[in-house]
Amino acid sequence: MDSLKSGDITVRTQKSGDAAYIAYRHCVLYEKEYGLCGTFEQYVLDSLVKYIEHRSEGEIWVAEYNGQIVGFIGVVSTDKNTAQLRWFLIEPEFRGTGLGRQLMTIAVDYCKQKKFSRVFLWTMQGLEVAYHLYSSFGFIPVEQVENNTWKRGVVEERWELLLESV
């Protein structure tokens, strides 16, 4: 997929049916790549259901290639000044194509447009490619928490971006 042109991928906002697919792909990929168990599926589903039910300020963007969903990212407000980056996933065969950077740019630009002063995300320790991407946007790690819910020994990290200085 290294020969992909950015014009080959379209990005749209979320529509009916996408939330279930987002949860499905997270569950399948995170089990395969990181060994996370089924409780991770409930965590992702619960967060998506909450987003759909409350429709707080936020958005989900879905990337498609030839009609196939190949990535997604979401932003939800947690309070008037703070947004959370959520549900960020790029299908393995589309990693390294610039799609992750494209979706991060869309999400961060949205946060700036909505005048959030802070954006945060949670990730797992050891995801070096993701760390590099987050760092390149100005996110910094601010907290580590051990979480044995999905698999023993998982360390989650909270990364934050202050938009006031951007």
Image (spheres, rainbow, N blue to C red):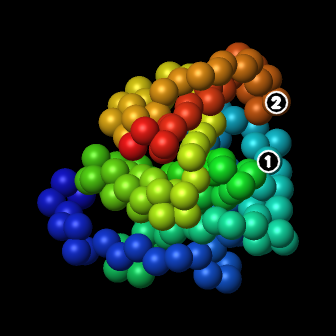
Q: Quadrant of the C terminus?
A: top left
| Disc 1 + disc 2, Cβ < 8 Å | yes
Residue at the spot of label 2: 149
Q: Give, as a three-letter code, the residue at label 1.
A: Tyr
69 is higher (above) or lower (below) than 74: below
145 is higher (above) or lower (below) than 75: above
Q: Which is more toward the observer, 81 or 147?
A: 81
Q: Give, as a three-letter code, the residue at label 2.
A: Thr
SS type, badge 2: loop
Percent across and percent down for residue 156 are: 66, 26
Q: How many marks?
A: 2
The span from disc 1 to disc 2 (Cα, nearest Å) is: 10 Å
The answer to whether residue 162 is left or right of residue 19 is left
Farthest residue to the left: give it. Answer: 3
Percent across and percent down for residue 157 are: 62, 26
Q: Residues within 10 Å of mark 2 (few under 14, many from 20)?
A: some
115 is higher (above) or lower (below) than 13: above
Is residue 105 in view from this perspective?
Answer: yes
